[in-house]
Amino acid sequence: MPTPEEIALQRIRAAAERGDTRLDLSRLGLTALPPEIGRLTSLQSLNLWDNQLTALPPEIGQLTSLQSLSLSFNHLTALPPGIGGLTRLQSLYLSHNQLTTLPPEIGGLASLQSLNLEDNGLTALPPELWRLPNLVSLYISFNPLPEIPPKLWQKKDWKELGLGGLQLTALPPEIGQLTSLQSLDLSFNQLTALPPEIGGLASLQHLSLWGNRLTALPSEIGGLASLQNLNLEDNGLTALPPEIGRLTRLEILGLHGNPLTLTLPRRLLKGDDGQEIFAFYRLIWQEGRPLNEVRVLFVGPPGAGKTSLVHRLKDNSYIENRPTTLTVETHAIPLGARTAHLWDFGGQDFMHATHPLFFSARCVYVLALNVRHTYEQNRVEYWLRTIRAFGGDSPVVVVGNHADAQGHLLDLPQNRLQREFPNILAFVQTSAAENSGIDRLRAALEQAVESLPHVRVLFAAPHLRVKEALEQEKTRRDIIPYERYAELCAAQGIDDPADQATLLELLHDLGVVLDFRDEHGEPLSREGILNPNWVTEAVYRLITDHEVRGAAAGQLTAEMARRILHDYEAPHRRLILDLLQRFELAYPAGEAWYLPNAMRQDEPPEAAAEEWQSALTFEYGYSQLPESVITRFIVRTHEHIADDLVWRWGVILAWQGNRALVRANVADRKVEIRVIGPRNTRREMLALIRGHFEAIHRTFTEGRAQGALEIHEFICPPQYPGLRLNYRDLLTYEKERVGEIQPVWNGRLLRLNVSELLNGFVEPEARRKEVSQMEKSIHVEIHGDVKGGNVVIGNENTIQQHIEHSFNTPSNPDLAPLLAQLTQAVEKMLAELSNEEAAKARKNLKRLQDELQEPKPQKEWYSVSIEGLIQAAKNVGKIGGPVIELAGKILKLLP
């Protein structure tokens, strides 16, 4: 088989014999261009894209008739001086190489009109560039340029400029002088505002501002009379100025990823039709107003004084030795120009498991700490990680209460905490007793509220009327059927179910109503939308009842439920209990219900039996261990509890002749799993247990909770007590064919066979699947109902389970199928693109696929690839529609 260089040489010779004016040497894998290329003095177009060239031969300068030269997607580190001899060259494509400088000879390209230098390593541009008389198109995106040379803005005849990914924080007013400019790409910079002079670009047809930090647009945007395509996606825009409605030629308006889309109907957002969006916004411009409401959640350990702080903010009242809060109290107060709904949560450990019910995004969190307690006593990181798990990147104000003149002050590693939790907006010291620091707290809360974009988003009157109608409904009933909600929406012209769902999600986050959903978007309260006060009152009555927490040790009989919820109808009591089970806070057994977090604290004697010392042992180690992890596990596996052997921190299970001890140690931040029984089936029981924990862990590690917890897995060989080996490391050793490891145990150097060690815990086939998932950074979706021994844990029916299998990336279970669909759509689109455009699309797709295989995809990388695919799709008309739609969906699912 001929080498790439031999193939190229054959084509060069054939072209020379025929006197060809075009030559395609793309995608050959060339590492060097034959010097014979210099013979083609009549050549007008040379395509060398997507090879492995690191340099060009000097003979390239002999191609004096060349008009188009494509060198994109190579490994060029420099250009030869001979490049300046190409005096007839009009188009030069050098994107996606490794160029760090350009030779001054580039100034000899007197005919050059278009130059593409995107995605190189250029730190400077030569002054000769600005003297090229015919250069009107320049693309320099994604180069490490420290600044844009002022001469760029002084050249007034530009038609196309690509300035994406250059970390620009501002545009100079001189941009308004570029009156011939037709296309301007400013995507993926750090722009927070646009200068009013932008309105002077009367010839501009395409403007991309994707991925900046814009929170508003100047009214002068309405002066872009020729604009056809405007991409504003992934910014912080909360409104559009009315003047933008003057853009009568605008066909495509991209708004995904902006807060203002909260009020934009999905059909409009999906279609990107500029004129339809303007028609909708005219209603908002006429009568819209911001919602001006936000939830402020006070959380933290018991004794921190949360309730006292709330009352100081509410009416400046203070009660000495105020009783401990054993529920959730709510209060509405003015906070600047907004209304804040304060939710005061009890901090007792047994109440932590209720956090998933009431923590959400689009809230402000106040973490109240007791300055007289130590860092560990306040469990600072536990609370911050819990907020991240259920509130995403919602702003946090950390308050050190009980500060006084005697030296009790907030003592925290503030710089480190803000690095690890960048959503911390302020640290404030207060004393509710002495009424000090309250004004500073109020100011910090006002700042935090203003940082939430949704409080400034303009809502059309129909949305506001639906909210008001729901408030009225709550005064008449505590369960509002979904059909009734749909009627209220339809009465205001909100007919699309997707738009109704978007509005309902916002109203849930605001605490107007509660609409709990599972990981698949299905409602947990199928009877309808719930009145928050009605739900919280019932839940906290049950979990704080003295009998339930005392003599009953977590058992809740029907008679007790009637007593506790005496003013709730029987069907409603059942609904509350079902909701507790769906949130994995309680489980039914016989005629009673059991609340694990109210059970006895001490382990039964069976948990200390010697038989567990030789058990198959697996452990999870946590950066912080949420108490709800073990509670949820007990609820999920309650049908397999052996002889009622269950307590607050653990359980003993029985399954097919095996027994398992599963217990949590909050102090050591670990969960221990010990399995005894027949050797041929105990691995299967361990797999079942791990499946449940993986499902629980995903709620702390995926989606908006990504990064909330670090979780490590360990195997503990019973013959070496105290030895803990990182399970993922062992899988990597096995994959890399490392046969033996030598850990140190009790002062001895051991020699352990990796595969034999792993065989005792996990079947080889299951390990191969785990390794495959590790390589793809894709998790197995494990749906965890335990019904008659049927547990959903994998994709093969090997342990008498019902199997339901899906792969998903770390951030969302819907991502993998969307990525597969996008790949197919891009492949169909490639035939409509030029060679260079197709190459760019392929590379963007490959980069996107690679980035999404990372455990934590980086926005600055995947967003560039998505933008590139969408731009390519917009150039091919209808066939690019699926690519635009799918790329937009993927972007919305990413963190």
Image (spheres, rainbow, N blue to C red):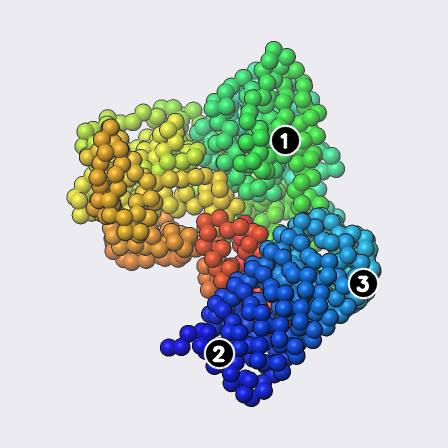
Residue 543 in which image quadrant: top left
Three-letter amino acid code at disc 1? Answer: Ala
Residue depicted at x 62% and y 76%: 63
- Give the residue displayed 25% in from the left and 52% down from the top: 764
| Residue bearing mark 2 | 9
* Callout 3 touching callout 2 (CB < 8 Å): no
Q: How far is disc 2 from disc 1 in space, using C-alphas?
A: 67 Å
Secondary structure state at the residue bearing disc 3 = loop
| Image location (x, y in percent) of residue 323 | 54, 20
Q: Which disc, if any, is residue 156?
A: 3
Q: Nearer the viewer, residue 35 or 141?
A: 35
Name the element at disc 2: helix
Where 562 falls versus 233 (above or below)? above
Category of crowding for the residue at label 3, using alpha-carbon neighbours closer than 10 angstroms: few (below 14), some (14–19), many (at least 20): some
| Residue situated furthest top in the rendering | 406
Residue type pointed to by label 3: Lys
Question: Pointer 2 and pointer 1: residues touching (CB < 8 Å)?
Answer: no
SS under mark 1: strand
Q: Which residue is mark 1?
A: 426
- Residue visible at 58% across and 21% down? 410
Q: Amino acid at mark 2?
A: Leu
Front label number (1 vs 3): 3
Q: Give the position of the N terminus as an image quadrant.
A: bottom left
| Residue 585 appears in the picture as rendered | no
Q: Is residue 702 above or below residue 804?
A: above
Residue 773 placement (x, y as % from top left): 37, 54
